[in-house]
Image (cartoon, rainbow, N blue to C red):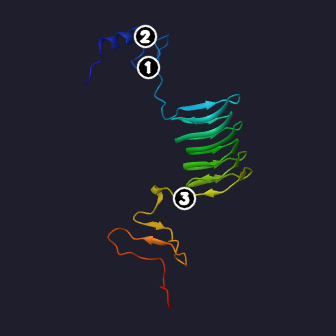
């Protein structure tokens, strides 16, 4: 069993409240709980940045950016007032404003209802809402994490006339081909 310290007992008798209860009068404020997972930086509508923008926290942009944006391990949100003319590299990108440039994301890219993108998208998951604008190409290559265990699809060699893709067999198994027939005649 634990025993309360004399200081806790004294503060309880002075305030009439048990330790841990919210104090009724002015006291020292304790630091807020850690918010490292929820830290979000914001660039306001009146801010204009030209050049390279890098960071190690989530970012919301409502201003104007020209150049490159690199947030490889964090989320980038282009707010409704955001005007971006940049190449973007981020973990995840949400577009509510306007982007002119290519976007590459490790996780996902979302273009919301009023968002607009003129550029190519590269991400394993892409979401384009009805009412948004998009002009460019989409490359939804799987990340290495999402490949089936033990299998890897390999591109056909350049000299293969029928262009059949092959699946590499899991280690310990004999190699297999997706082709059902070999070539005949020669």
Left or right of 114? Residue 58 is left
Which residue position is annotated with label 2?
A: 15
Q: Of the two numbered discs 1 and 3 on the same chain, state the one appearing first in sequence.
A: 1
Residue drawn where x is 49% and y is 13% of the image: 24
Q: Residue furthest left?
A: 1
Residue 17 rendering spot, x and y as whole percentages = 42, 15
Q: Say which quarter of the image contains residue 137.
A: bottom right
Which residue position is annotated with label 3?
A: 141
Residue 134 rendering spot, x and y as whole percentages = 71, 52
Left or right of 46? Residue 42 is left
Q: Nearer the viewer, mark 3 or mark 2?
A: 3
How far apart marks 1 and 3 lie (CA) works out to: 54 Å
Q: Of the two numbered discs 1 and 2 on the same chain, state the one appearing first in sequence.
A: 2
On screen, residue 170 above or below 132:
below
Residue 29 rendering spot, x and y as whole percentages = 47, 16
CB-based contact (under 8 Å), mark 1 and mark 2: yes
Secondary structure beneath label 3: loop
Which residue position is annotated with label 1?
A: 21
């Amino acid at each position: 069993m634990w025993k309360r310290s004399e200081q806790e007992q004294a503060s309880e008798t002075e305030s009439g409240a048990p330790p841990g209860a919210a104090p009724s009068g002015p006291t020292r404020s304790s630091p807020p709980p850690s918010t490292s997972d929820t830290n979000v930086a914001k660039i306001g509508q009146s801010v204009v940045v030209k050049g390279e923008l890098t960071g190690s926290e989530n970012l919301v942009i409502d201003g104007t950016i020209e150049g490159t944006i690199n947030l490889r391990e964090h989320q980038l949100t282009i707010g409704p007032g955001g005007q971006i003319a940049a190449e973007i590299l981020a973990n995840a990108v949400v577009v509510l404003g306007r982007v002119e440039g290519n976007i590459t994301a490790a996780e996902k890219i979302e273009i919301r209802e009023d968002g607009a993108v003129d550029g190519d998208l590269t991400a394993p998951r892409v979401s384009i809402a009805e009412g948004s604008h998009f002009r460019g190409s989409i490359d939804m290559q799987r990340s290495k994490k999402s490949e089936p265990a033990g299998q890897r699809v390999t591109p056909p060699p350049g000299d293969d006339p029928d262009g059949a893709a092959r699946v590499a067999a899991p280690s310990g198994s004999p190699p297999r081909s997706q082709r059902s027939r070999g070539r005949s005649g020669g």
